């Protein structure tokens, strides 16, 4: 099973992936987690470019679109382990939400693995800006509002669940477990 977490910065992806991993492991599953950008050579380059003051410009966004597609190709083999639950922090769906045009992003990502389940952590943009500890160009309300709107549209093409990420960590975690439980043969009503 390949589960993807999506959502703007500060939505709680890292926090919730850690909690979901612990819970699945406690239920006897083997879990592997991944983060995009990865720690590959391309991923390192992406992290560097993300820090540029012009990172939100069209030219750099298109550069990032290409690099993210390449970074994904490099780790493709890790996504198909039959014995493990793979949980990824972001996927090509992030590229569709952040970069454009969509037809081009889809084309350069056409070999990327389609997630079995996408959990979209939906957070208010203002809360995102307050929670985020990164000081980069993406902490911009207008930019993030656009990404959020894109996400809600794109997500319809995938097997997904929208999770309200505005609540406390435990409430969000419990909603995520309830969404994942049916795929794991765990009773959703047994979750607090
Ligand atoms: P992401 O990986 O999506 O950027 P993080 O999990 O890193 O988000 O969370 C960003 C910050 O917000 C962290 O400081 C984290 O502790 C905090 N946080 C995460 N979830 C919640 C929540 N439900 N309520 C309040 N703060 C949260
Ligand atoms: Mg994170």
Image (spheres, helix red, strand yellow):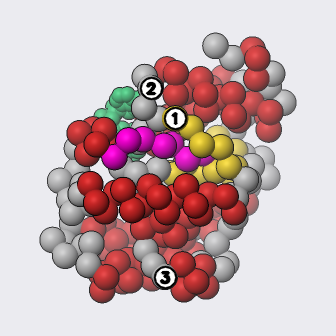
Number of on-image labels: 3
Q: SS at mark 2?
A: loop
Asked whether residue 124 is drawn in magenta, I would say: yes
The alpha-carbon separation of the residues under discs 1 and 2 comes to 7 Å
Residue at position x 76%, y 17% in the image: 189
Q: Sequence order check: which comes first, mark 1 or mark 3?
A: 3
Cβ atoms at labels 3 and 2 below 8 Å apart: no
Q: In the shown orientation, is residue 161 left or right of residue 101?
A: right
Q: SS at mark 1?
A: strand
123 above or below 96?
A: above
Q: Sequence order check: which comes first, mark 3 or mark 2?
A: 3
Query: Where does the image place residue 134, in percent across and percent down from the top left?
Result: 22, 50
Cβ atoms at labels 1 and 2 below 8 Å apart: yes
Rendering quarter of residue 183: top right
Residue at position x 48%, y 43% in the image: 122
Asked if the residue at label 2 sits under 8 Å from ligand 1, the reply is: yes
Q: In the shown orientation, is residue 190 left or right of residue 24?
A: right
Asked whether residue 32 is drawn in magenta, I would say: no
105 or 144: which is nearer to us? 144
126 or 25: which is nearer to us? 126
Cβ atoms at labels 1 and 3 below 8 Å apart: no
Q: Residues within 10 Å of mark 3 (few under 14, many from 20)?
A: few
Q: SS at mark 3?
A: loop
- The residue that mark 2 highlights is 167
Q: Which residues are magenta?
A: 119-125
The alpha-carbon separation of the residues under discs 3 and 2 comes to 33 Å
- The residue that mark 1 highlights is 164
Rendering quarter of residue 10: top left
- The residue that mark 3 highlights is 101
Query: Where does the image place residue 39, in percent across and percent down from the top left?
Result: 41, 62
């Amino acid at each position: 099973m390949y589960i993807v977490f999506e959502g703007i910065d500060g939505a709680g992806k890292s926090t919730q992936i850690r909690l979901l991993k612990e819970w699945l492991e406690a239920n006897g599953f083997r879990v592997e987690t991944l983060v995009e950008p990865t720690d590959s050579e391309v991923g390192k380059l992406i992290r560097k470019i993300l820090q540029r003051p012009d990172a939100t410009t069209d030219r750099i966004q298109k550069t990032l679109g290409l690099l993210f597609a390449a970074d994904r190709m490099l780790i493709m083999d890790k996504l198909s382990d039959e014995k493990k639950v793979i949980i990824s922090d972001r996927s090509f769906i992030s590229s569709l939400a952040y970069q454009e045009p969509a037809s081009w992003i889809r084309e350069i990502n056409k070999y990327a693995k389609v997630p079995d389940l996408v959990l979209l952590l939906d957070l208010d943009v203002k809360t995102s800006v307050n929670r985020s500890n990164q000081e980069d160009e993406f902490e911009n309300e207008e930019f993030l509002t656009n990404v959020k709107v894109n996400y809600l549209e794109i997500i319809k093409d995938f097997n997904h669940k929208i999770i309200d990420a505005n609540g406390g960590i435990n409430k969000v975690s419990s909603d995520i477990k309830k969404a994942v439980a049916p795929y794991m043969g765990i009773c959703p009503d047994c979750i607090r």
